[in-house]
Image (cartoon, rainbow, N blue to C red):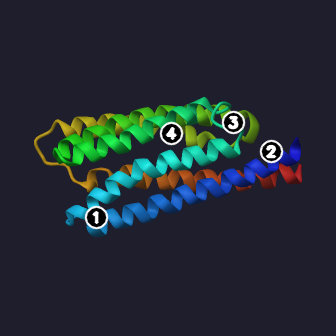
Amino acid sequence: MRSLLAAQSTWLRSYYVSRAVFSIVWVAAAVLLSAQPTPVAFLLVIYPAWDAIANLADARVNGGLWDNPSQALNVVVSAITTLAVIVAIGRDSYAVLAVFGVWAILAGVLQLVTGVRRWRDYGAQWAMILSGAQSALAGGYMISRSIGTVAPTILDVAPYAGFGAFYFLLSAIWLVAFADRNARA
């Protein structure tokens, strides 16, 4: 049992690092390409799609979707969001930001639930719990911006992705420290 938890903890650290790297690259691309409509549309579509794929992969490694209901629901929410972003892009940037806001709230709450559940087995999940809560708050902010008078851009989503990168990287580092401390005990 202990070796299974160690393998899953190693996976979780790698998973968090890959999520951080994706978000960092996404933010950099968003900033560099913010004035170009086609790349921006692509970036807006792949962000929730990546979240769905990442949650699916993580749930499968950690017992499957049935054993990870918050991640299973996050896969569904992120997949639906991907389709909703495609539709919203055809409408306007206000609609896109509203979709991202709703998704940030739902995905944040589901991430918070996943972090709380994982705390028992892996410890060191406080950053993911905090990230989930902040995601939900950021979603509310995005929704408020989506009903404003200033036209939203991808740069209204970039800070959300940037904070996600920070929390994923922090979680990976914290798990390394947690594993090191447990190995010494």
Counting every numbered tag in the picture gives 4
SS of the residue under disc 4: helix
Instruction: Give how far apart the Cα atoms at labels 3 and 4 are.
Output: 21 Å
Which amino acid type is marked by label 4? Val
Judging by the rendered image, the residue that carries numbered circle 2 is: 5
Compared across the picture, whether 163 is left or right of 113 comes to left
Instruction: Give how far apart the Cα atoms at labels 4 and 2 are.
Output: 23 Å
Q: Residues within 10 Å of mark 2 (few under 14, many from 20)?
A: few
- Quick check: 42 above or below 57? below
Which amino acid type is marked by label 2? Leu
3 vs 4, front mark: 4
Mark identifier at residue 75: 4
Mark identifier at residue 119: 3
- Disc 3 and disc 4 in contact, CB within 8 angstroms: no
SS of the residue under disc 1: helix
Which of the two discs, 2 and 1, labels the residue nearer the N terminus?
2
Which of the two discs, 1 and 3, labels the residue nearer the N terminus?
1
2 vs 1, front mark: 1
Identified at 57% across, 42% down, the residue is: 128
Instruction: Give how far apart the Cα atoms at labels 1 and 4 are.
Output: 24 Å
Instruction: Give how far apart the Cα atoms at labels 1 and 3 are.
Output: 38 Å
